[in-house]
Image: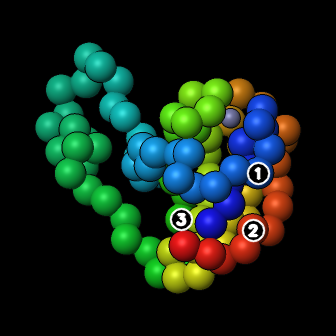
Amino acid sequence: MLITCPYCGPRDVIEFTYQGDGNRQRPQPSSQDLDAWNAYVYDRLNPAGDHNEIWQHSGGCRAHLRVVRNTLTHEISSSGFARGDHKAAARHKSEAKS
Ligand SMILES: [Zn+2]
């Protein structure tokens, strides 16, 4: 599986570390809403299809990336910086290799 880093270009998945579900919304630090904190800490999506994920290019530039990966085929439909200009995200079709 190849992931395209906006800095480094297409790289093998072995250079990256999975950082978790990219859909979680952290409550405000001062929030007293225990249900919101419980959902943030424990609830995870487990979709069969496209999944929004955070990956770190730990074997390269160390940037955090937001990647949309199909959990059935491992096809990556988009990748870009986890923060910042999402319009600059690299879009590509990768080979579904593991
Ligand atoms: Zn990189």
- Could you tell me how far apart the alpha carbons at marks 3 and 2 are, in whole angstroms? 15 Å
Q: Position of residue 46 (x, y in %)?
A: 37, 71
Which numbered dot is residue 94?
A: 2
Residue drawn at 72 percent across, 42 percent down: 5
- Could you tell me how far apart the alpha carbons at marks 2 and 1 are, in whole angstroms? 9 Å
The total number of labels drawn is: 3
Q: Amino acid at mark 2?
A: Ser
Residue drawn at 44 percent across, 49 percent down: 18
Decide which of 25, 61 is in the foreground and name it.
61
Residue drawn at 47 percent across, 81 percent down: 48
Q: Height in image: 56 above or below 43? A: above
Q: Earlier in the sequence, mark 2 or mark 1?
A: 1
Chosen colour scheme: rainbow
Residue drawn at 68 percent across, 60 percent down: 2
- Using a 10 Å C-alpha cutoff, classify the residue at mark 1 as few (fewer than 14 neighbours), some (14 to 19) or many (20 or more): some
Asked if disc 1 is less than 8 Å from ligand 1, the answer is no
Q: Position of residue 95 (x, y in %)?
A: 72, 74
What is the secondary structure assignment of the residue under circle 2?
loop
Name the residue that disc number 3 marks. 51
Name the residue that disc number 1 marks. 10
Where is residue 25, by image quadrant?
Answer: top left
What is the secondary structure assignment of the residue under circle 3?
strand
Q: Amino acid at mark 1?
A: Pro
Decide which of 98, 19 is in the foreground and name it.
98
Residue 45 at least partly seen: yes
What is the secondary structure assignment of the residue under circle 1?
strand
**Quarter of the image that includes the C terminus:** bottom right
Q: Nearer the viewer, mark 3 or mark 1?
A: 1
**Ligand 1 placement by image quarter:** top right
**From the viewer's perspective, is 50 left or right of 10?**
left
Q: Amino acid at mark 3?
A: His
